Image: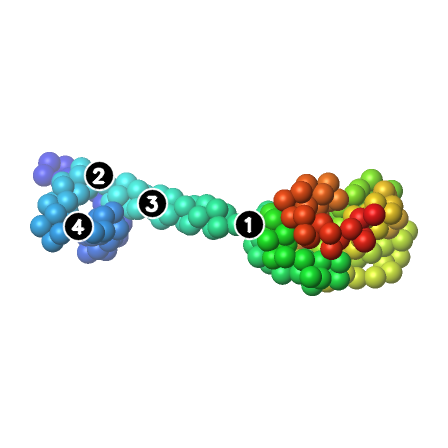
Amino acid sequence: MEGHGRASIFPGDARTKKNMAAARKSIRPTGTTAMESDEEEDEVGELTELLTPEEVLKGSSKRRLTSLYSEQQDSSRRGSVGGMSTLAIETELGKLQMFSGCSQELLADLSHAAQSQMAADGLVIHGKGDHSDAMMIVLRGCVGVCVGDECIMQLRKGDHLGETLFLAVEDYWSVQLVAQDLCMVCQISRDDLMTVLKEHPADKELLNRYLS
């Protein structure tokens, strides 16, 4: 019909205007003067008049998603391994007897070298006979230690297994490790340890009794 513009996609003009105003406000940059803000709002207003409310709000949602992604990236840059804070890994390493007396710098470097893994309920983390030189630490959840079809032990947050592999006493897992709920584990290999120790000679002296 003549005299009629494009129909609104929202039920009610008041709601449409409110959402468009919120979208305009969300894209205003911070740190501007009142005059600059008014000028920029006029420019944004002219732009949004050319868009449907759906297009304006879609752009606003995209910006929010981009912001969330940026925050996640910033969190990763602050230090995480597979989604787990390196500080949490460092804390668990500091509780192990073999690292008693070692420097925080060594523990921090080891935590960055660790390989972290999220495991769903029922996932086999290591099978019997798997070759390895890594010690495993449970960071979250529960891991079952199984021999055949029998679970002989459960490992929970802070528990570890595989020191004999880590210290080169053995080369293969003699048990099967199965996640018993959603859990996270980290593994540190002997190769990682020896590489890190090159930068920490004093700590290497303390650990020689385990490594020889």
Whole-angstrom CA distance, mark 3 to mark 1, is: 25 Å
Q: Secondary structure at mark 2?
A: loop
Q: Badge 4, how many Cα within 10 Å: few under 14, some, many 20+?
A: few
Q: Earlier in the sequence, mark 2 or mark 3?
A: 2
Please name the amino acid that badge 2 sits on.
Leu
Residue farthest toward the right in the current orientation of the protein: 148
The residue labelled by disc 2 is 51
Please name the amino acid that badge 3 sits on.
Arg
Q: Secondary structure at mark 1?
A: strand
Q: Earlier in the sequence, mark 2 or mark 4?
A: 4
The answer to which quarter of the image holds residue 54 is top left
The residue labelled by disc 3 is 63
Q: Earlier in the sequence, mark 1 or mark 2?
A: 2
Q: Earlier in the sequence, mark 4 or mark 3?
A: 4
Q: Nearer the viewer, residue 18 or 154?
A: 154
Whole-angstrom CA distance, mark 2 to mark 4, is: 25 Å
> Looking at the image, is mark 1 or mark 2 nearer the viewer?
1
The answer to which quarter of the image holds residue 161 is bottom right
Q: Nearer the viewer, residue 87 or 50?
A: 87
Please name the amino acid that badge 1 sits on.
Ser
Q: Earlier in the sequence, mark 1 or mark 4?
A: 4
The residue labelled by disc 1 is 80
**Residue 182 shows in the view:** no
Please name the amino acid that badge 4 sits on.
Thr
